[in-house]
Every structure is written in structure tokens, then in C-alpha cells.
Image (cartoon, rainbow, N blue to C red):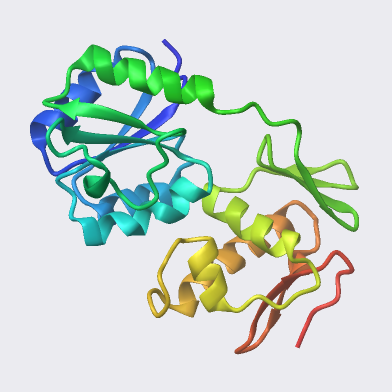
């Protein structure tokens, strides 16, 4: 059965993870299991996640680290005992109109129904394009398109990097801003070498396609910008 959605379950509760895996994989979803927010973030950087199932056992001061991805469009299902699922127990980014609550201990059918509701409630966006000069980022297919007719399918992190820079074309975006908007890191977390490594990989892919590797331009010690004019900064 083909996967219909990418689901991330964040829970230190082994029993909850097992129930979620059993009931959702049998319905064709691709499951990613994380025992902590740190593990969840590693998955979110690599993979586009449709629904995050977040356990109330995750410490409140850690859940805020997932707000970046929820605000960016991932749907949220909060897993909590009925007695704990009060307004005060919910993550601050929980939206009662958009997100779902599932009581613990989890019943497989209830979780599956909540996932189905979340997926059904995700609006189908019209084809969304970000164009800079002769280069276009198709945000629906997540593909970078070139005037030459070629294309590049970036990784999820590369896609977020490209989108951030292309939506702010002509601006210089600092490594700190990119770490926040692309990786979801709080200020002072992460290092510029992480951005530098991803930009280097992206340039290598562009070069292998015969495209200009300096579409992503670097101003040393200051930041990055996107330009389709092929001129190297700095």
C-alpha cells in the first residue's frame, strides 16, 4: 500500500509509539518515531512532515522548538490524558480550530481518524511559484526550474533555504536568520558552518546540471543572497 502522508510521532512513551506505528502504518502512512524533540528536529530537517503527533509527556520548554514547523504548515495532533488536555496543558502554538486532541492511552482507531481529519483539513494550494529572473521555485512540487528547461529536486532543507532566499531576493540574509527560518534554531544555536555546508552542496548540484553555481551568492562574514544574474558577490 503506498504511503499517503508523512507522520512524525514525538513521544518518550514506548507504548504510545508502538500503538501509533501499528495503526498508522497499516493505513499506508510513512511513520517517523522520535523519543525527544532533538530527534524530532533531525527528522524535520531531512523530511517534509505532514502531521506531527506530540505527546504531553514532552517537557513544555522543549515543545516550543517544534513551533517553527507547525507554523510553517505541519498539522498537529496533541496526545494527552483526558484530565491533562485542558487549555493550560496545551502547547502555546496549539490552535483548537486547526489541530486535534487525542486522549491517552491511545486507541488506534481514534488516532487514525484524527490523522484523516487533519489531512482532509489541509487546504489544497494552487500551484505556488517563486520566480527570480529566469529561475523558478515551484513550491507545490518543491522543484527548482531553469529557463534552459532543466530542473533540480532539492532536499527538504535545500528547498527551505532556496525559498527563504528567493522570497527575499536582492536582500542579504545572515546565517543567524537562515538558521532560524530554515532549521528552526533559536538565536545563538547552531553555527554558520551548517549553512555554509548546505550552500556548498547546493552549488555542487547546480554545477553538475550545467547551471550557475553562484545563484546563491555569498558575502563573506555577512550572509547570502539569491541572484539570477550570475555575478559572484564579495
Q: Is residue 132 left or right of residue 26?
A: right
Residue 24 visible in the shown view: no
Residue displayed at 24% across by 62% down: 61
Q: Position of residue 201 (x, y in %)?
A: 58, 62
Q: Which quadrant holds residue 175?
A: bottom right
Residue 206 visible in the shown view: yes
Q: 96 above or below 161?
A: above
- Nearest the viewer among 142 and 65 is 65
Circle count:
0
Residue displayed at 65% across by 75% down: 173
Quadrant where the C terminus sits is: bottom right
Q: Is residue 162 left or right of residue 179?
A: right
Q: Position of residue 103 (x, y in %)?
A: 19, 27
- Nearest the viewer among 119 and 103 is 103
Q: Position of residue 162 (x, y in %)?
A: 67, 58
Q: Is residue 182 left or right of residue 105?
A: right
Q: 107 above or below 228?
A: above
Q: Position of residue 215 (x, y in %)?
A: 77, 65
Q: 141 above or below 157?
A: above
- Nearest the viewer among 226 and 95 is 95
Quadrant where the N terminus sits is: top left
Amino acid at each position: 500500500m503506498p504511503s499517503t502522508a508523512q507522520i512524525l510521532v514525538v513521544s518518550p512513551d514506548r507504548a504510545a509509539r508502538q500503538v501509533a506505528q501499528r495503526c498508522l502504518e497499516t493505513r499506508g502512512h510513512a511513520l517517523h518515531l522520535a523519543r525527544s524533540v532533538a530527534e524530532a528536529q533531525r527528522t524535520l530537517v531531512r523530511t517534509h512532515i505532514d502531521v506531527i503527533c506530540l505527546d504531553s509527556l514532552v517537557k513544555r520548554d522543549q515543545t516550543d522548538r517544534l513551533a517553527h514547523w507547525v507554523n510553517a504548515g505541519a498539522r498537529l495532533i496533541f496526545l494527552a490524558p483526558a484530565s491533562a488536555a485542558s487549555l493550560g496543558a496545551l502547547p502555546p502554538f496549539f490552535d483548537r480550530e486547526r489541530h486535534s486532541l487525542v486522549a491517552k492511552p491511545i486507541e488506534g482507531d481514534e488516532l487514525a481518524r484524527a490523522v484523516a481529519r487533519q489531512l482532509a483539513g489541509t487546504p489544497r494550494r494552487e500551484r505556488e511559484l517563486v520566480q527570480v529572473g529566469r529561475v523558478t521555485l515551484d513550491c507545490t512540487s518543491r522543484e527548482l526550474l531553469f529557463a534552459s528547461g532543466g530542473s533540480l529536486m532539492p532536499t527538504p532543507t535545500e528547498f527551505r533555504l532556496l525559498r527563504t532566499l528567493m522570497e527575499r531576493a536582492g536582500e542579504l540574509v545572515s546565517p543567524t536568520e537562515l538558521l532560524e527560518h530554515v532549521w528552526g534554531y533559536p538565536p545563538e544555536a547552531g553555527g554558520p558552518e551548517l549553512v555554509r555546508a548546505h550552500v556548498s552542496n547546493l552549488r555542487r548540484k547546480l554545477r553538475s546540471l550545467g547551471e550557475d553555481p553562484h545563484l546563491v551568492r555569498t558575502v563573506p562574514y555577512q550572509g547570502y543572497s539569491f541572484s539570477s544574474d550570475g555575478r559572484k558577490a564579495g
